[in-house]
Image: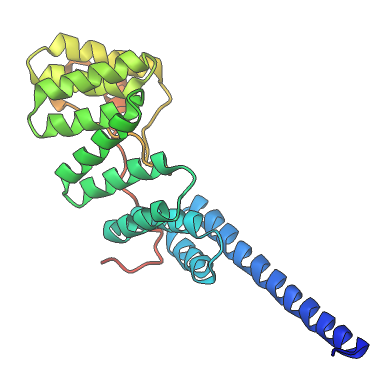
Amino acid sequence: MYSQADEERCGMVLALVEEELRKDELARERSYRRGVELLERGKCSAAVKKLTEAIVRGERAADAHAGRADAYYRLRKYREALTDYEKALELNYEHPELLFFSMACAKEELGDLEGALGVYSAIIEDDPDEPAAYNNRGRLYFERGRLEDASADFEAAIALDPGYSTPYFNRGNLRAARGDVDGGADDIRRAAKLNPEKTFTDLLFHTERQLPWPRHLAAVFSSAWFWFASSCRPRRPVDDGTAAHT
């Protein structure tokens, strides 16, 4: 039988173990939060390091994998990003719809356009009221020469959200490609009017994709309009200067 002294010693050991576990939990949380902070500041390589620490320690693994995936994406390490996005989904990440968009964009960067189309179609099947998925899928259809499918998707995106400027720009590009220069110019003016401040830079979760500026419409616009459309092209993710390129 245990004596009173034995019980006291056991209590002391348990208290020490609990304290060490608490310290380890705090350390893991610090690694995750520091990784997120570095990612928000654009320090992607440093963010990868801290989020990897959090993953190894097993704290907030789904969030850490999703964050590290975005850091890899910005570093143009698209295969690593895809692996982490898939792992985050496997670990029941809280916002899977955001990961699906990011996964589709990573597939595009790797040249897997059919894979990206499949992801956007899956998003639409799961949520038929998501305009960005129609817009993004329409852009891929356009680039593959499937103009009727592209037009239908841009129309769907606009119908779902008439204030969403990106599909107007993309529809304008499509109209211009079909020879309807005036209609294309009208759509691009509409996009600018809806959101004159928008620059379509790379977003954390990469939810919007836009066609290149249709340069054969340049003569229709003043230099100010041309600046707007040129600035709307999404920027490629940039290295923060601390990572080696692959």
Image coords of residue 25 (percent x, y): 65, 67
Hey, which residue is sitting farthest front in the picture? 1
Of 223 and 184, nearer the camera is: 184
Residue placed most toward the observer, 33 or 10: 10
Locate the C terminus and report the quarter of the image it occupies.
Answer: bottom left
64 relative position to 179: left or right:
right
Res 149 visible? yes
In this orientation, does residue 76 appear? no
Residue at image point 39% right, 63% down: 241
Q: Residue at x 43, y 25 (%)?
A: 197
The picture places residue 128, in percent across and down from the top left corner, at 32, 25
Q: Position of residue 80 (x, y in %)?
A: 31, 61
Q: In the rendering, at what x and y percent does residue 39 appear? A: 49, 54
Is residue 123 shown above or below 18? above
The quadrant where residue 183 appears: top left
Q: Is residue 170 above or below residue 61?
A: above
Q: Which of the 4 image quadrants contains residue 90?
A: bottom left
For residue 149, side relative to residue 195 (left or right) = left
